[in-house]
Amino acid sequence: MTTPHTPHPHSLPSRLAKPAQRALAAAGYTTLEQLTQVTEADLAHLHGIGATAIGQLRQALVAAGLSFAPGN
């Protein structure tokens, strides 16, 4: 019997649209911790990342006790 895969607690949200998932993967972002090193504005420049994806990522970060890097 196999056990269901439990995502890492700081994994990126699985409900992100596929273009956003691809954009993050192409930029090397695979965990929420990595997103603490980037600003929302920088992420928004990635093709495939829009306001909805930023909001979902922000919610996931807050739930994990994390946040995006502060903007300048």
Image (tube, rainbow, N blue to C red):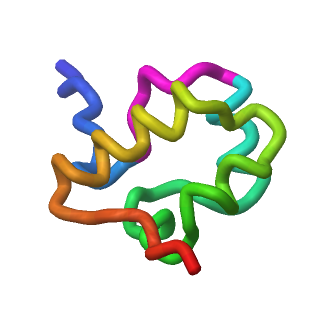
Pick the front one: 31 or 7: 31
Is residue 14 magenta-colored? yes
Q: Is residue 46 left or right of residue 32?
A: right
Residue sitting farthest toward the right: 47
Q: Position of residue 9 (x, y in %)?
A: 22, 50
Residue at 83 percent across and 39 percent down: it is: 47
Residue at 49 percent across and 64 percent down: it is: 35
The correct choice, above or below, for 58 with respect to 70 in the image is above
Q: How many marks?
A: 0
Q: Is residue 19 left or right of residue 2?
A: right
Q: Position of residue 27 (x, y in %)?
A: 75, 58
The correct choice, above or below, for 5 with respect to 26 in the image is above
Residue at 28 percent across and 49 percent down: it is: 8
Q: Is residue 48 left or right of residue 50?
A: right
Q: Quadrant of residue 65?
A: bottom left
Pick the front one: 62 or 30: 62
Q: Quadrant of the C terminus?
A: bottom right
Residue at 51 percent across and 76 percent down: it is: 37
Q: Position of residue 29 (x, y in %)?
A: 60, 59
Q: Quadrant of residue 57?
A: top left
Q: Position of residue 36 (x, y in %)?
A: 43, 70
* Segment tinted magenta in the rendering: 12-18
